[in-house]
Image: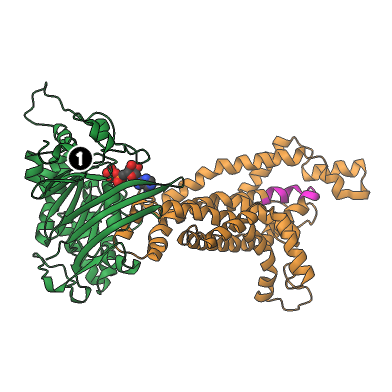
Amino acid sequence: MASVLDVQSLSVEFQVNGRYLPAVTNVSLTIEQGETLGLVGESGCGKSVTSLAITRLLSKTARVNGKVLFSGPDPAQRNPVPSSGPEEVSARNVRERELLTVRDKDMQDIRGNEISMIFQEPMTSLNPVYKIGSQISETLLLHQNISPRQAFSQSLEMLKKVGISRPEQIMHQYPHQLSGGMRQRVMIAIAMACNPRLLIADEPTTALDVTIQAQILELMKGITRDFGTSLLLITHDLGVVAEMCNRVAVMYAGEIVEQGSVDEVFFNAKHPYTVGLMNAIPKFDATSKERLQPIEGNVPSIARMPKGCRFAPRCPHVMKQCVEQHPDLFEVENGHQSRCWLSVEGEA
Amino acid sequence: MLKYVIRRILEAIPTLLGVTIISFILIHIVPGNPVRVLLGHHYTAERAAALSRSLGLNKPVWEQYFIWLGHILVGNFGYSYVYNKPVVQMILQALPHTLAIVVVAVLAAHLFAVFLGSVQAYFQDTVFDQVVTVINYFLYSMPSFWLGLLLVIFFAIDIRWFPSGQIINVNDPHPGFLDWLHHLILPVASLFLISVAGWARYMRSSMREALLQDYVRTARMKGAKEFRVVFVHALRNSVLPLVTMLGLSLPGMVAGALFVEEIFNYPGMGLLYWNSITNLDYPIIMAVTVFLGIVTVLGNLLADILYGIIDPRIRYR
Ligand SMILES: Nc1ncnc2c1ncn2[C@@H]1O[C@H](COP(=O)(O)OP(=O)(O)O)[C@@H](O)[C@H]1O
Ligand SMILES: [Mg+2]
């Protein structure tokens, strides 16, 4: 059976002052049914741009190349009611489509229905002038042939599923009356209302308090498991990846620099950038002398990408070759890849 | 809500008082003496002194002011010097005409601006958007009285579609609503044209701003069509600044109406105002000032209430 999402050589350039600048270069990744893939990297590495390119929500100044293959249920045979248990999609009624070339109309049918997104900013992601109830119902009404009454009661059910207390009241409230955590729960309810096959969560907990973060992650874990939804979880926090993901792709300066199963990447990290990120994770058992070691330097701006390895200027193991030649994504082990000259077989 | 309205009205009282004081001082500074105007060539020093005394003009200005204030507080606006009619009666005759022009023009201009600005945002950066922007800019930079004159010359004098002045056709023994409307069109049109351009520009930028917001991205994420994104999600948020402007722009609109009435010889508050200034008809000048002040305050209040209806964040505060 085909992967739910199969991104092949995705590149995004932005037109800035007449020049096209590379924000995302040659990104390939796959997500299987029910799997959670983590996409990690510091801020400015191109994670959001990647996710917005997949859903075609980028501005007109973006030029996107590559392929985004999505296999979703055939619209003709889809069960419109979100079932309480995992939805089994058999190979027979699955259809693969290339999202970068489908018509706008088809993309609108896919968004919110088969692919949904949650964003980083719960405080501003809901429309301030409409009630919570109508904002959830809207998704249902856009994609399913049901009455407003039915949409309302299904929305109420969704609010219960995302663990909101007093859901009847919340349905009639406005976003500004809710806390950040509650709003993110509402966003999850909106995103999951139509039982999508793929959920993309772009730093869904970054803007929240630590205790709320854990609750929201727990909720996402549970709800994607119950619905059988695949999850692309974008984060800059490797701790979140360890908690939530099956596989992980590490992104740096618009490229994937390391990719593999979470165990492989965590216990056998190959790329110096990944190693750097791991050293920057706060350890609870650390003595006060074992300080965090953030990687020195900054992510390069898309206007001045290094010619060779993009991490070379910050890399502790930089060699002459790194500055001159751009490394490929080398296979280290089955399913574990690293974009580093040190990872070339026999050299490490 | 009621509390809020009452508070706003109370807050407006000092402003209104200030306006009346300034007007009172201004009309007494302006060269000219109403007594001289009234007596014309019957003027003699004795008659002037007698008339001055009977109108109370011989007293110091501050005393005159307090006498006037005491009177209007009990609803007595006095009599016109020139027409010898109760001022309230004259104003009540003129006010509906002015209100009609202003209300129709403001509403029409706003609705059209909201529509045009949204459509422009929907067709962002297309040729349509650019052409409308240029036309808007052209209209925006045009002085109102000049535009009014152009309209009179073209529609009333050249092609004679609309009357150039007056409120009703004096030759018509039974002037009706349609006739009234016919006379209303040109003044409203000139007021509409000068204000719509500015508001449409404002609406366009407010709309473009709204379309960059996170909740608009959410709407697109849900699979909403671009039409729905613009006219349902962004529109209601982007009219908010426009509604604020509605309140702020009212004094300007009323002032514009005064000019327009002069050009079209339209018997509203404007014409009454101009004539009374020429004649130094103090009671009318002061009364018109007070009425326009009240209308402005009420208009602002109305805009605030409207804002609360559109924006739940205001309503619940
Ligand atoms: N619309 C845009 N125009 C130009 N550059 C952009 C645009 N959006 C993002 N970028 C650039 O692309 C790079 C990646 O951004 P982003 O995907 O938001 O990073 P992150 O990994 O933090 O989500 C950044 O350098 C950013 O400045
Ligand atoms: Mg981001």
Q: Nearer the viewer, residue A179 or A142?
A: A142
- Image location of residue B152, percent across then percent down: 75, 64
Instruction: Give me the residue at 20% from left, 40% from top.
Output: A209
Query: Toward the viewer: A249 or A323?
Result: A323
Q: Which residues are magenta?
A: B277-288
Q: Which chain is orange?
A: B
Tag 1: residue type? Asp
Q: Residue A327's quadrant in the figure?
A: top left
Residue A315 sits above or below residue B177 on the image: above
Residue A313 place in picture, x, y as percent: 27, 31
Where residue B277 sits in the image (x, y, percent)? Answer: 77, 49
Q: Considering depth in this image, is B265 or A331 the residue closer to the camera?
A: A331
Q: Can see residue B304?
A: no
Left or right position of B51 against A189: right
Label 1's element?
loop
Is residue A257 inside the magenta stretch? Answer: no
Q: Chain of mark 1?
A: A
Residue B286 belongs to magenta span: yes
Q: Residue at x 76, y 69 (%)?
A: B156
Question: Residue drawn 91% across and 41% down?
Answer: B46
Of the chain colours in the picture, the one used for chain A is green
Mark 1 = which residue?
A209
